[in-house]
Image (spheres, rainbow, N blue to C red):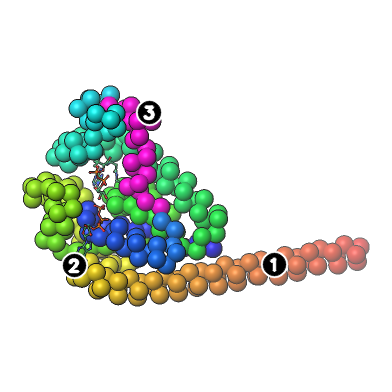
Amino acid sequence: MSLVIGLTGGIASGKSTVVELFKRKNATVVDADVIARKVVEPGTFAYNRIVREFGTQVVGADGKLNRVQLGRLVFQDETKRRQLNRITHPWIIFYMVRDCVINVLMGRPFVVLDVPLLFETKRLLWLCSVTVVVVCNREQQIERLERRNQLSQEEALQRINSQMSLQEKASMAHFVLDNSGTLTSLEEQFEHLWQQLQCIRKRRLFRYKLLGTSCFVIGICLIRTIFTSFLKQ
Ligand SMILES: CC(C)(COP(=O)(O)OP(=O)(O)OC[C@H]1O[C@@H](n2cnc3c(N)ncnc32)[C@H](O)[C@@H]1O)[C@@H](O)C(=O)NCCC(=O)NCCS
Ligand SMILES: Nc1ncnc2c1ncn2[C@@H]1O[C@H](COP(=O)(O)OP(=O)(O)OP(=O)(O)O)[C@@H](O)[C@H]1O
């Protein structure tokens, strides 16, 4: 039996850092950002539509999408961002559901869906038994984003403001990891979370076993009743 965990947070709040901690525990990770890159590879339906609607200015010399240029366009213009989401999200959702179902059917104990926009789009929430949000304070988020993506403060703020606030996300999640401190502090919180997730999975496993055994016993009793009443006739 699998426990499907929806992992989300803000841009540069620390999701990928938490994903590495999940991987250390041998959890399976399905990453929406990785899928989002695959669905726009040259020749795909989404790629062709993006080039048609946004123009060749978003295509690099190698024929692939120029993500820096496309990012600049969509994070400063909500209409363009919605347009890009309309093209890419149905494909991202399709492959996320597919990969999640495959891993569940393979009996992976913990399947983590790393989805930055889990609460914004809500279209993958139905798959998740548990949701975890990684937050950090705003100043750190800006600083980490500027440093990692080499953005100006204005560009970093545009990206942060294009998403639901971290407070709102935290209020919607089952568990919150606060990544405002050191990596050691994050790891400590993660260990505690991991213990809780293991307990949740064990409880579910027990309930499913109980349900399975009850169904089996009821089935046997039913067959016995039908059989004995048939013999009496
Ligand atoms: C805009 C694009 C080209 C920028 O590419 P880039 O390589 O610079 O960033 P990357 O893809 O690694 O995303 C980094 C982070 O940006 C944020 N982000 C990405 N797309 C969006 C969006 N449409 N709205 C809000 N935030 C977004 C997420 O927090 C994500 O983790 C790219 O993010 C994209 O194609 N976005 C549309 C698909 C999408 O929604 N992806 C998010 C997965 S649900
Ligand atoms: N506790 C921490 N202390 C210092 N730096 C950190 C900490 N946590 C993460 N970082 C750094 O902050 C940056 C953003 O972290 P990370 O890539 O994990 O965020 P993310 O939520 O996955 O971002 P995105 O969704 O935008 O890809 C990275 O460069 C990472 O090394």
Q: Does the residue labelled 2 lie within 8 Å of ligand 2?
A: yes
State the residue at coordinates (21%, 36%).
70
Give residue 87's position: percent from left, percent from top: 32, 34
The label on residue 137 is: none
State the residue at coordinates (18%, 53%).
148
The label on residue 180 is: 2
Region rendered in magenta: 30-51
The residue carrying mark 3 is 43
Q: What residue type is labelled 1?
A: Phe
Q: Is mark 2 on a helix, strand or loop?
A: loop
- The one of 61 and 65 positioned closer to us in this rendering: 61
Q: What element carries label 1?
A: helix
The residue carrying mark 1 is 216
Q: Is mark 3 on a helix, strand or loop?
A: loop
Q: Which of marks 1 and 3 is nearer the N terminus?
A: 3
Residue 169 in sight: no
Give residue 95's position: percent from left, percent from top: 43, 43
- The one of 220 and 128 positioned closer to us in this rendering: 128
